[in-house]
């Protein structure tokens, strides 16, 4: 302390030195740190202050408003997280801290991201589309169950099934529902039941648990086996609030295993009642129908056609006579009309006929060959023989003289 | 599928319960409307009663069996299953 030659620094100088040292460190500039959140506080400014700690150490953290607004998690004390950011120094307090850029939940958080990724991928592929949803059979003969043989699911299903419908059988394909092989085993079970056509509907499920416990039902291999199943599938995974990928792909999602069983096993007593009521309605409506027809028949039988059947025939006969009379008159009138028409036409034709003209005293002169008509003096010569057609015969004549004046006619 | 069901409905023995109830409902409605001619009504009634029998048989025919499947890779065997108390 007495060494006069040693320089003396201010706190600010030291702090600045440390700050520069830390903040220029490349590894500390962009670093991932995992730890548990504690002392988490969000100020009215919107900035988030908290401490990340593990068993031995802790580090103060700040996440600015504009960074923490995009957080996909709710930062709370005790949450395990992975934070990315840089180590900085807060000069006023002489304290190093982490300025957090991004943060996600560790463990559960990572699974959540994987879940969201797979969900989005399968959704884009159309695996969740309603058009692929198969109808759950109304009255199956056999219900296949893919679950653990020791879990609550199979017990619940058997309870519901025996209570509701004692004619539907259950085939359990036992599988582990958590652990490394669970997904593969569940997928295989669904495939095998399909191959051997062992059931009319399949319930796939397990009881509640953490997201890690339910994880097999978020695996792609399970999702695809459900999608490819030709047998309709009801999913029943965890509790009502748990949604797994399997639930989205399944043809129907039941909130609990018991609810799944209620969907698969219709209540026999209700159905029996329904059928009995149909039987009753059938009988009643048939008897009523026959009664109505009998009443109609009776009404018809007392009507006049059955009492005085010839009334109708006589009336028909009378109208027949009337019709015959009318038809005859019509025909006669028509014949008369046509006859007078014909004589008129005949008279007209007669007036136009050359024979008619001849009958009135005119004659037609033909050359000797009888083909061409002699129309003027040029058509004949002296001594030509000609034929003259008159009303009752033909005159054979010889031309003696030709004069162009039509007052001198050739004579026979 | 629909085609297959339709065919089996004509045969009458392998009709599904649901289809049978559907047809039964239609027949009952027709009879209740009272519009069917007598011969047709008789046919409908006969078919209706037949369908109620089919439905009852389907509800009652089988005895519930609860089995566990044992998959040995090739064949799948079945053994009776008793739920273990957890």
Image (cartoon, coloured by chain):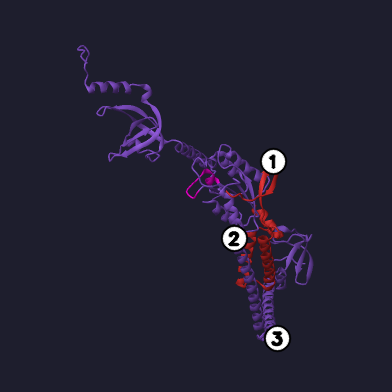
Q: Which residue is mark 3?
A: A309
Does the magenta-highlighted stretch encompass residue A242?
Answer: yes
The disc numbered 2 marks a residue on which chain? A
Q: Residue at x 60, y 66 (%)?
A: A274
Q: Which residue is mark 2?
A: A267
Q: Position of residue A266 (x, y in %)?
A: 59, 58
Q: Which label belongs to residue A236?
A: none
Q: Position of residue A125 (x, y in %)?
A: 53, 40
Magenta residues span: A239-249
Q: Would residue A179 appear left or right of A39 to someone viewing this image?
A: right
Which mark's residue is nearer the viewer, 2 or 3?
A: 2
Q: Secondary structure at mark 3?
A: helix
Q: Which label belongs to residue B72?
A: 1
The disc numbered 3 marks a residue on which chain? A
Q: Position of residue A15 (x, y in %)?
A: 26, 23
Chain given the colour purple: A
Q: Residues within 10 Å of mark 1 (few under 14, many from 20)?
A: few
Q: Position of residue B65 (x, y in %)?
A: 67, 54
In the picture shown, does residue A295 fall above or below A221? Answer: below
Task: Decide which of A27, B78 is in the foreground and name it.
Answer: B78
Which mark's residue is nearer the viewer, 1 or 3?
A: 1
- Counting residues from the start of the chain, the first of labels 2 and 3 encountered is 2
Whether residue A406 is visible to the viewer of this picture, yes or no, is no
């Amino acid at each position: 302390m007495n060494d006069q030659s040693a320089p003396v620094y201010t706190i600010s100088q030291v702090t600045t030195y440390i700050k520069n040292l830390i903040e220029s460190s490349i590894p500390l500039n962009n670093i991932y740190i995992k730890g548990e959140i504690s002392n988490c506080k969000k100020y009215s400014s919107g900035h988030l202050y908290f401490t990340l700690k593990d068993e031995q150490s802790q580090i103060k953290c700040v996440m600015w408003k504009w960074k923490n607004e995009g957080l996909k998690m709710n930062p709370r004390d005790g949450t395990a997280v992975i934070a990315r950011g840089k180590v900085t120094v807060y000069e006023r307090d002489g304290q190093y801290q982490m300025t957090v850029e991004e943060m996600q939940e560790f463990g559960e958080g990572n699974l959540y991201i994987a879940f969201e990724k797979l969900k989005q991928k399968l959704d884009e592929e159309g695996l969740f589309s309603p058009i692929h949803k198969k109808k759950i059979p109304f009255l199956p003969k056999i219900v296949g169950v893919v679950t653990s043989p020791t879990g609550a699911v199979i017990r619940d299903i058997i309870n519901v099934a025996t209570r509701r419908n004692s004619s539907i059988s259950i085939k359990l394909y036992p599988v582990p529902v958590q652990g490394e092989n669970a997904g593969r085993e569940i997928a295989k079970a669904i495939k095998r039941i399909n191959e051997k056509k062992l059931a009319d509907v399949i319930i796939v499920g397990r009881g509640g648990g953490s997201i890690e416990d339910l994880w097999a039902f978020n695996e792609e291999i399970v999702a695809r086996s459900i999608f490819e199943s030709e047998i309709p599938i009801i999913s029943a995974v965890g509790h009502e609030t748990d949604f797994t990928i399997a639930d989205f792909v399944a043809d129907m999602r039941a909130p609990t295993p018991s609810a799944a069983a209620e969907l698969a096993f219709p209540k026999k007593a209700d159905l029996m009642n329904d059928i009995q009521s149909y039987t009753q309605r059938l009988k009643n409506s048939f008897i009523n129908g026959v009664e109505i027809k009998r009443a109609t028949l009776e009404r018809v039988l007392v009507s006049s056609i059955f009492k005085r059947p010839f009334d109708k025939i006589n009336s028909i006969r009378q109208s027949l006579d009337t019709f015959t009379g009318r038809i005859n008159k019509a025909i006669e009138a028509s014949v008369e009309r046509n006859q007078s028409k014909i004589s008129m036409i005949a008279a007209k034709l007669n007036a136009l006929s050359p024979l008619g003209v001849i009958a009135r005293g005119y004659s037609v002169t033909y050359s000797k060959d009888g083909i061409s008509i002699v129309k003027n003096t040029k058509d004949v010569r002296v001594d030509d023989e000609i034929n003259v057609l008159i009303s009752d015969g033909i005159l054979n004549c010889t031309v003696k003289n030709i004069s162009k004046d039509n007052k001198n006619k050739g004579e026979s | 599928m629909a085609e297959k069901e339709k065919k089996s409905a004509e045969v009458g023995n392998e009709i599904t319960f649901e289809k049978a109830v559907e047809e039964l409902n239609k027949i009952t409605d027709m009879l209740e409307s009272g519009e069917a001619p007598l011969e047709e009504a008789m046919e409908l009634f006969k078919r209706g009663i037949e369908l109620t029998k089919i439905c009852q048989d389907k509800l009652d025919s089988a005895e519930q069996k609860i089995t566990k499947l044992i998959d040995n890779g090739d064949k799948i065997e079945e053994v009776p299953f008793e739920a273990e108390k957890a």
